[in-house]
Amino acid sequence: MSNKKTTLKDIAGKLNISTAAVSKALRNDSRISTKTKEAVKKVAKDLDYQPNNLASALRSGKSFLVGVMVPSTNSYYFSSVLQNIEEVLNSKGYNVIVTQSNESYTKECNNIDTLLFTQVDGIIASMANETVDLDYFEKIKSKGIPLILFDRGENDLNVDYIGINDYDSSHMIVEHLAQQGRKNIAHIGGFKHTRIFNNRIRGYVDALKKHNLTLVDDYVSESNLTIEDGRTQMKHLLGLKIPPDAVYAASDYAALGALQVLKEHHIKAPTTIALVGFGNEPFTTMVTPTITTIDQHSAEIGKLAAQTFLEHADKKTTTQHLNKKILEAKLIVRESSKE
Amino acid sequence: MSNKKTTLKDIAGKLNISTAAVSKALRNDSRISTKTKEAVKKVAKDLDYQPNNLASALRSGKSFLVGVMVPSTNSYYFSSVLQNIEEVLNSKGYNVIVTQSNESYTKECNNIDTLLFTQVDGIIASMANETVDLDYFEKIKSKGIPLILFDRGENDLNVDYIGINDYDSSHMIVEHLAQQGRKNIAHIGGFKHTRIFNNRIRGYVDALKKHNLTLVDDYVSESNLTIEDGRTQMKHLLGLKIPPDAVYAASDYAALGALQVLKEHHIKAPTTIALVGFGNEPFTTMVTPTITTIDQHSAEIGKLAAQTFLEHADKKTTTQHLNKKILEAKLIVRESSKE
DNA sequence: TACATTTGGTTAATCGATTAAGCAAATATA
DNA sequence: TATATTTGCTTAATCGATTAACCAAATGTA
């Protein structure tokens, strides 16, 4: 029980050959005799040799580490994306370092610094709600490290992006509600400065027009879309002179908060107010009524993000062929919006 | 735009001094003049210098990376533990590498190998359901790397462990159900070979005795405790000659599956059958009826696991003072078990 | 003045794996 | 036999940061 790690030197010492020979033997170099190779491999196994990635990484400039930064791993969406990123990258020999921004810009900057410090080969990220300034993301690019954004990304930043069609999603939702005969559709939205939420708002506004529904200012709000935000906004909507007959929340969490308030006020969904969320979090099928929502293809987004990184990693060419992959979202109609 | 990373050499070249001087200047060595320090720091800032952790790690033998392995990041429990581990470790300059076993022993072994390969300074893990053989975990110990287990751990393995008191939790649950006048309490359990599930089963059996309730073999099952398992077991229980009047599932997911089946059969919970889960997953408060459950203090477990690692990291003494921290769980009574 | 001490650095070794370059011995070729 | 080629290794440099050991110049001390 040596309690210490075996190095090439240990193997070399045991066999009285150079570490170079050992290294080559383990990588099946043609210039090493079969006999030596076998001997080396046997000793390596006996001593439980495990190559030191730090050393190879330092020399080769490749760490086989990929940084992933998400607002939080708590939601099903992000943890599912994460799981799929990890699966794809692991199968190609990469490890994943996970960091969370907790929706804080400061934390996000710190995270980027430590990821760069750790010499990750690439970064896959979804931005915090708070983030407006993109300097720190530019920093990643300026260091020549592939950056892939998903879900929460920015157009200004000229990098790869994987996401769903938020604008169309809003159209699908409004169309569905209009078909149910709803006239006063409210929107509990995210912050406009985040592209995806901006797109959802734009889609909502344009779809209202398309269906000859009037846009009421009081029906639209911006927030972080937490459960609590959903509660607050729903209470506000109920307090209006003419409350809406349908509410489209830009996140399932906000929709859940809204639903709680409806129940507390003994208002029936969908009879009195129809409700639609966004994200297809598992709980939308667990609550009563089940919540109509948009599926974001989290698994596929995770896989695509990982594959996009791998494309960069494979061809070392700096020719940054930009990948913008926009998936078509799917509306899943459930009890909360259809009678 | 150099598109390349700045090294000590670059700074040294710019100032015509040695890299050693630069290194010392950045670490405020007393043998470097204030003037030089200032000059170095200015250039470092201008060139956006970021130390290369691979290099320091290689030399110092400390990577400031900690591996975390969980069955899956999908559940609230694990993602909450993870979030807290990350928070505590980040504040001390460590990064977290996340791997998931997906409840597979093979994947677990692979994960351990890649974590060792990556030269993590420690490993925090919760074992897969499948895992029985502990050789691979012994391997971690034999390399002198701190190993901290939480939730799913094994007594045979002489390592640090953080968890809750599963045995007592079962007692609390059975006592609560007995107080509600329930006589026939079933248990949808996990696999006995996993310690925590074994403890829950033992606690259940002993508590039945204590309350003079008879143990019915048909009332006890072992499974992976997924939603689907909960459904299967509940159907089985409903098919018995004398169905139970209370069901205690060893996971909230199984409890949710059971609840779904009850609803489909229009059986009222808690009126006809009382239901208790385990884990305090958020959805237990979202469903109707809300589910009585055990809170596992996920946040605290994450923090404690991280702190336990830090203790090892701080004192390099090999004196492995064993830490076994067992938290008292909390029963949260909700609608599904109390009329 | 003669020696000691402090200041402010430089040189070189180190961590472990990799690889270009080199070299001796064995084998092939003419 | 003389030369060319192949085989099978060794030597040494490299990646970037750190640090022990060393040294010259400046300053202090008796």
Image (tube, coloured by chain):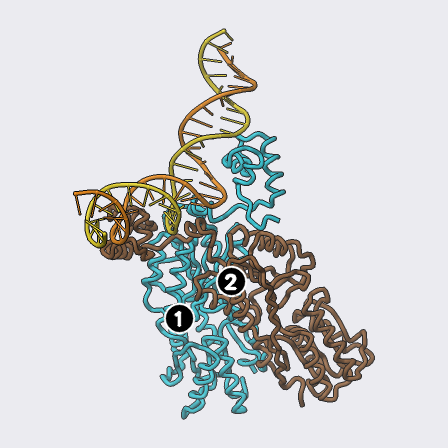
Chain colours: A cyan, B brown, C orange, D yellow
| Residue B203 appears left or right of A65 | right
Name the image quarter holding residue B263: bottom right
Under circle 1, the secondary element is loop
Q: Give the vertical position of C14 relative to B116 (above or below).
A: above
Labelled disc at residue A82: 2
Which amino acid, by three-letter code, is at mark 1?
Ser
The answer to which of marks 2 and 1 sits earlier in the sequence is 2
Labelled disc at residue B254: none
Same chain under badges 2 and 1? The reply is yes
Q: Is residue A179 visible?
A: no
Q: Is residue B122 visible?
A: yes
Q: Nearer the viewer, residue C9 or B121?
A: C9
Number of the front mark, 2 or 1: 1
| Residue A136 appears left or right of A68 | left
Provide residue A145's location: percent of width, then percent of height.
39, 53
| Residue B307 appears left or right of B269 | left
Provide residue D25's location: percent of width, then percent of height.
20, 45
Provide residue B21's location: percent of width, then percent of height.
30, 49
Crowdedness near tag 2: few (<14), some (14–19) or many (≥20) residues, C-alpha within 10 Å: many
Query: Pointer 2 indicates a residue of which chain?
Result: A
Q: Residue at x 38, y 73 (%)?
A: A202
**Count of marks overlaid on the render:** 2
Q: Residue at x 35, y 61 (%)?
A: A137
Crowdedness near tag 1: few (<14), some (14–19) or many (≥20) residues, C-alpha within 10 Å: some
Which amino acid, by three-letter code, is at mark 2?
Leu
Q: Most extreme residue toward the right, as rendered?
A: B241
Q: Which residue is mark 1?
A: A104
Q: Give the vertical position of B250 relative to A135 (above or below).
A: below
Q: CA distance from mark 2 to mark 1?
A: 19 Å
Name the image quarter holding residue B50: bottom left
